[in-house]
Amino acid sequence: MANELTRKQGQEEEQHRYLELGLTGRRMEDRLLASAQRILYEQPSQGGQNRCLRKHQIPAFSGFADFLLDLATSPDPATPSPYCRIILPPRTGKTVVASRIIGLTGLCSTFVVPTRALVRQTAEELHRQIPDTPIGVYYGEIKEPEQHGVNITTYATLQRHFSSGQLPESIRNAALIFLDEAHHSMTSLRMGTLGAAFQPKSVRIALTATPNYDHKRQLHQFFPQLIHETDLLSAFESGLLAPARMWVAEVDVDGSVVRLIAGDFETQTLGRLMSSAPFFKAVEQFRYAEPNLKIPALIACASRQQAYDLWIYLQKNKPSNHPVPGLILGDTLARERESLLDRFESGEIDTLIQNVT
């Protein structure tokens, strides 16, 4: 019986690729150096890693490998900075690149994301990309961190639990910290937390499509080491993104008023106004106007409720020969999301509705 239990435990361990098992308690410099040696050893087979990446993702992946080698082996402890940035357009696979970096370096990692929905989505994506690596989550009521794997948390949870002294060591001791939608990190409180919550030499990797949020929050000021950047103009020119076109349609809503308070719209009034019938009618008429009938459409809504209400409205008011629109919300399961996107790309669905908050 004992032999059978030992055999089963061994099989379970073989199914997982635990990160840094032999480096527990070692200095961060030693852990990064071990990773650099691993990169040098693995470089002849990096073609296998690259085959899993799209053409536009390879420079970011290769650039980080070079950066980590330089960081781990530089004789000057002051340079380069462990704060670096990777800039890629929306929906071009930043999480895929990050997963390949984790796979190559073998370093324990922490992902920080803006929302709870993104915790779930990131966990699902990492499970697909590096299925043998333990993935932990730490947010809200779910606190299941992994000691030798990748942990995912939110900016708010990170800040709150670090301030209260409750942040697990498995998160604090990560060698790689990926900051998704990194423009969300550029406040004094959050940057202070990112500096103090992790070891000084842990590598902070900012991932974003919008490096310059405003004149005060510009990514290069906080993350000086540029690993790779593909800006929107280059993405359009290379065909990575489709050319953008925009129309503005004004809708008269019978004198309804949206007040501006402290530079932001009054949320409840705006929500009611944008969910009203005249707005939905405007969307219907524009979406199904003759020039637009054969053009695939993505409709971005200001709230979850507005997206759902519009989905119901268009089901009732679309042309009879057009398919029912797809609906993607923040908590839509990854498999359902992928199914809808596949059907959209194949032309089975011609309209997708989603909320952007």
Image (tube, helix red, strand yellow):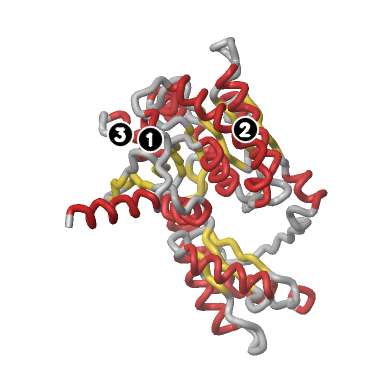
Contact between marks 2 and 3 (CB within 8 A): the answer is no
Residue 348 place in picture, x, y as percent = 65, 78
> Is residue 162 found left or right of 190 in the rendered image?
left
Mark 1 is surrounded, within 10 Å at the Cα level, by few (under 14), some (14 to 19) or many (20 or more) other residues, namely few
| Amino acid residing under circle 1 | Leu
| Amino acid residing under circle 3 | Leu
Q: Residue at x 68, y 45 (%)?
A: 47
Residue nearest the observer in this picture, 190 or 9: 9
Q: Quadrant of residue 24?
A: top left
Relative vertical location of residue 285 with respect to residue 5 in this rendering, above or below: below
Relative vertical location of residue 204 with respect to residue 268 in this rendering, above or below: above
Residue nearest the observer in this picture, 288 or 104: 104
Q: Which mark is residue 167?
A: 3
Q: Quadrant of residue 183?
A: top right
Contact between marks 2 and 1 (CB within 8 A): the answer is no
- Residue designated by label 2: 65
Q: Earlier in the sequence, mark 2 or mark 1?
A: 1
Q: Residue at x 65, y 36 (%)?
A: 43
Mark 2 is surrounded, within 10 Å at the Cα level, by few (under 14), some (14 to 19) or many (20 or more) other residues, namely many
Mark 2 residue element: helix
- Distance Cα–Cα, label 3 vs label 1: 21 Å
Residue 344 place in picture, x, y as percent = 64, 71
- Residue designated by label 1: 21
Q: Nearer the viewer, mark 2 or mark 3?
A: 2
Q: Residue at x 38, y 31 (%)?
A: 22
